[in-house]
Amino acid sequence: MKSIYVSLLFIFVTISVYQSANAQELDAGFNLQLIVPQNEFDESINTMGGGINIYGLYRFPQSPFGLGLDFNFNNFGRDTRDEPLSSTIPDLKVRVENEYNLVQGFMVAKVQPQDGLLRPYAEGLAGFNYFYTQTSIENRGFQGDEPIATDTNFEDWAFAWGGGGGVMIRVFDRRGSANLDAENPIAAGYINLGVRYLNGSEAEYLREGSIVIENGNVSYDTLQSRTDMLVIQLGFMLRF
């Protein structure tokens, strides 16, 4: 969760800076996304993932080119079990949850028309994959409570790069509005439909069922492969 908060803060600060220095030259967006593993990654993990994407992009004035930062927070499943809090208190049980997560960060270069009802685009990306498995202890029956304890028990990094494309569909345009000012700088809004193919170098990771508890001991069924994936996105973009 800390990585999500830091990234959201970074995007907010970036937007604030560009709003004051470069009006109407920033895009900021949010996507829901489906992750479809490819090649040996698909054979190893044997499941699809899903998550969210947030990004900020600076558009060069009077140009189709833009540069930005892109962050993704994905999940490939979770498993839960109920366990006694301790061997001396067997009648007090807690819920143990394992989450299999992937965080990605990219530098993005995009080519896209500056204007239009439909704005097709192509993009190139380079950055990282961060696979981690997080175990948390929670009270049973109280959904939404903060975990009693959490721990990252497995993690690995990999280089990632790729490309994608899509189209943005304009849903509103305020650029001719007299109310477009520093207090309300949103110039236009677009629905985004996009797809990416990301190549990932080799990494170690876990999947659902990889954590085995036996006679009070834990072992990990570690998987290792390249981490190529297809990403399908649906979201919304605001133009400043």
Image: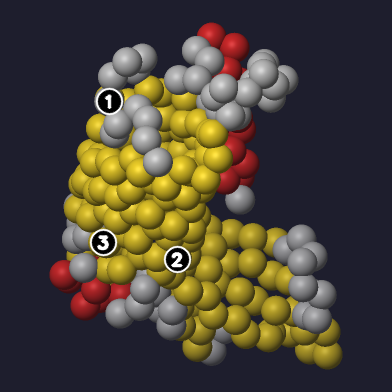
Q: Residue at x 51, y 84 (%)?
A: 213
Task: Name the spot of residue 228 as percent of width and height, x first.
Answer: 22, 60
Q: Is residue 195 left or right of residue 18?
A: left
Near mark 3 (Cα within 10 A), the count class, few <14, some 14-19 or many ≥20, is many
Q: Earlier in the sequence, mark 1 or mark 2?
A: 2
Q: Is residue 68 above or below residue 94?
A: above
Near mark 2 (Cα within 10 A), the count class, few <14, some 14-19 or many ≥20, is many
What residue did someone put label 3 on? 229
Determine which quarter of the picture holds residue 4: top right
Asked if marks 2 and 3 touch (Cβ < 8 Å), the reply is no
List the single residue furthest toward the top.
21
Kind of element beneath mark 3: strand
Q: Nearer the viewer, residue 84 or 208?
A: 208
Q: Is residue 69 above or below residue 16?
A: below
| Nearer to us: label 1 or label 2 | 1
What residue did someone put label 2 on? 50
Label 1 and label 2: CA atoms lie apart by 30 Å
Q: Is residue 113 above or below residue 51?
A: above
Q: Residue at x 31, y 75 (%)?
A: 45
Q: Is residue 185 left or right of residue 114?
A: right
Q: Is residue 173 left or right of residue 232?
A: right
| Nearer to us: label 3 or label 1 | 1
What residue did someone put label 1 on? 64
Amino acid type of disc 1?
Pro
Amino acid type of disc 2?
Gly
Label 2 and label 3: CA atoms lie apart by 12 Å
